[in-house]
Amino acid sequence: MDDPLPLIQQAMKGLLPDLLGMEFTLVTPERVVATLTVRPELCTVGGILHGGAIMAFADTLGATATVINLQGGSTTTIESKTNFLRAAPAGTVVTGETTPLHRGGTTMVWQTRVTTADGKLVANVVQTQLVLKGK
């Protein structure tokens, strides 16, 4: 397969990942990586990245990883668990890195680590993607 990064970035134009400001930097079957600049409109009243924004960021990475591993068909998230461990203040950049825990024909399970620029863990997300077979 050719480098899927340009196709993924183009597919996200105008969608939630684009509105969040996600920048994909690596897309492979084994690992998907993206960055997100923490803008004030993505924050809580306290000026830290909103948990919902973190979850949407991680969910997009896990879904992207599943799509890259599919042989046709599509996917949907059926479960997601997030541990929030550290605040990410406005003006910083976080990185999400997704790796597989399980890649089956019916489900795929991904772990996404969201970290600060200095490598400190902001959140750990484990999600299960249902593999929807194409017709």
Image (cartoon, helix red, strand yellow):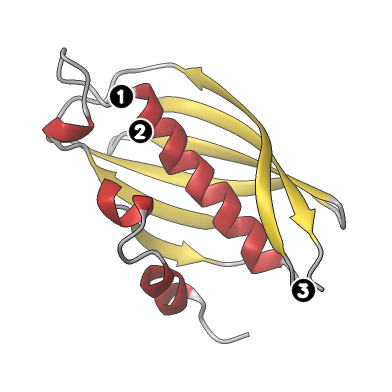
The mark that comes first in sequence, 2 or 3, is: 2
Question: Could you tell me the amino acid type at mark 2?
Answer: Ala
Q: What element carries label 1?
A: loop
For the residue labelled by badge 3, is the local secondary structure a helix, a strand or a loop? loop
**Residue 88 on image: x %, y %:** 26, 26
Depth order, front residue of 15/38: 15
Residue 47 point in image, percent of width and height: 15, 20
Circle 2 residue: 53
The number of numbered discs placed on residues in the rendered structure image is 3
- The type of residue carrying mark 3 is Gln
Residue drawn at (45%, 73%) of the image:
5
Q: Is residue 56 above or below residue 48?
A: below
Asked if the residue under mark 2 is in contact with the one under mark 1, i.e. CB atoms within 8 Å, the reply is yes
User: Given the current orientation, which residue lies at the most extreme front position?
Assistant: 135
The residue labelled by disc 3 is 71
Residue underneath mark 1? 50
In which quarter of the view is residue 133 placed? Answer: bottom right
